[in-house]
Image (cartoon, rainbow, N blue to C red):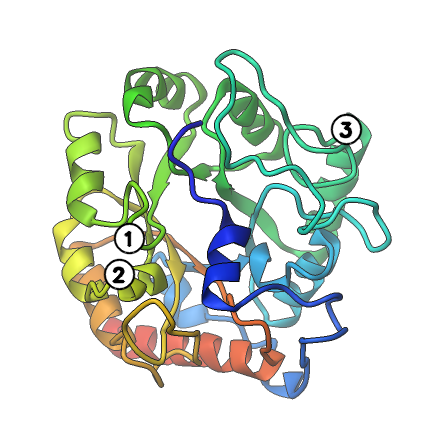
Amino acid sequence: MGHAVNRRTFLRATGAAAGAGLFGAGYHVAGAADAGKGAPHAEKLGWRLGCQAYTFRAGSFFEAIDKTAELGLHYIEAYPGQRLKPGAAADAGKAKDESKPKEKGRGRGNPPDSMGTGLSADLRKETLKRLADKGVKLVNFGVGPANKAAFDFAKDMGIETLVSEPAFNAFDDLDKLVEEYQINIAIHDHPKPSPYWDPEIVLEHTKGRSKRIGACCDTGHWMRSDIKPVDAIKKLEGRIISFHFKDLNEFGRGAHDVPWGTGRGDVKGMLTEVKRQGVKAVFSIEYENRTFAMSELAECVAYFDTVAAELGG
């Protein structure tokens, strides 16, 4: 649907293009000994911490499931176009982009060996088995389309929330679809000048709509738009559904991900505000850096759960 921002275009602009393989050029995977503990204190607050598969975009979705489980986490958000299994033809660089506008009534989908509406029935079953075997639940899908084909895919895969940047004139239809399917739409914010960069714009278009239509709070992209995440979370009270959770080294377009609690995003302040609002949400770890270590992701998990323990008393 219209107004979506192409992730790969954004990453080229910020110098954060993906590497050639999950363990290949540009990716440093080390120090995972601290991983695996998960976030049990966060679970007590109703916070489900997982990974956006885009963090592992140079590999396959099955590999992203494995790495999520390795961190001790039980939730994952898929994105359109990631190749399903190692060696599959489609990948993040070659797959069709589901975030671009579509002709009404026609879902273009993805190749049958990549995540998306084109995934074959047999591969959908295989994917659900892989998830179950690893103790990981596919909860969210995006950033992608918000059309009927996407809702059908979400229903088939047990997905709770479609993360999208729909056209401004799509909300009448979305109001009906979210109630028909009992599946949420979470409006995502890419940096300025994307359509939903400002929380006020999200509030404008969700006003009077179903409570199943709300915000996917990308805290890092707010920082790239020079918005303080805590302020944005306060504004969106009552409309928060999920998070692409990040901490960046600085504000502005050129900022990059750092382990949570070491940047300028005020992670503890964000979580304190989420706790005050009583939000029970999915928090997806999403690293957009070209280079990262599993130890950094484990550090994010540990910090998140430590703050949750403090807030939970």
| Residue type (three-letter) at the residue carrying disc 2 | Ser
- Of circles 1 and 3, the one toward us is 1
**Foreground residue, 259 or 180?**
259
- At which x and y percent is residue 257? 44, 74
Labels 2 and 1 touching (C-beta < 8 A):
yes
Q: Residue at x 69, y 61 (%)?
A: 58
Distance in Å between CA atoms under marks 1 and 3 = 36 Å
Q: Is residue 313 above or below residue 13?
A: below
- At which x and y percent is residue 136? 62, 54
Residue of label 3: 120
Q: Is residue 169 above or below residue 52?
A: above
Can residue 313 be seen here? Answer: no
**Foreground residue, 171 or 11?**
11
Q: Reading the chain from its start, which is encountered first: label 1 or label 3?
A: 3
Residue of label 1: 192
- At which x and y percent is residue 122? 81, 30
| In this picture, residue 12 sits left or right of residue 121 | left
Name the secondary structure under disc 3.
loop
- At which x and y percent is residue 127? 73, 42
| Residue type (three-letter) at the residue carrying disc 1 | Lys
Q: Residue at x 58, y 78 (%)?
A: 292
Q: Residue at x 28, y 66 (%)?
A: 223
Distance in Å between CA atoms under marks 2 and 3 = 38 Å
Q: Reading the chain from its start, which is encountered first: label 2 or label 1?
A: 1
Q: Residues within 10 Å of mark 1 (few under 14, many from 20)?
A: some
| In this picture, residue 99 sits left or right of residue 187 | right
Residue of label 2: 225
Q: Residue at x 61, y 78 (%)?
A: 294
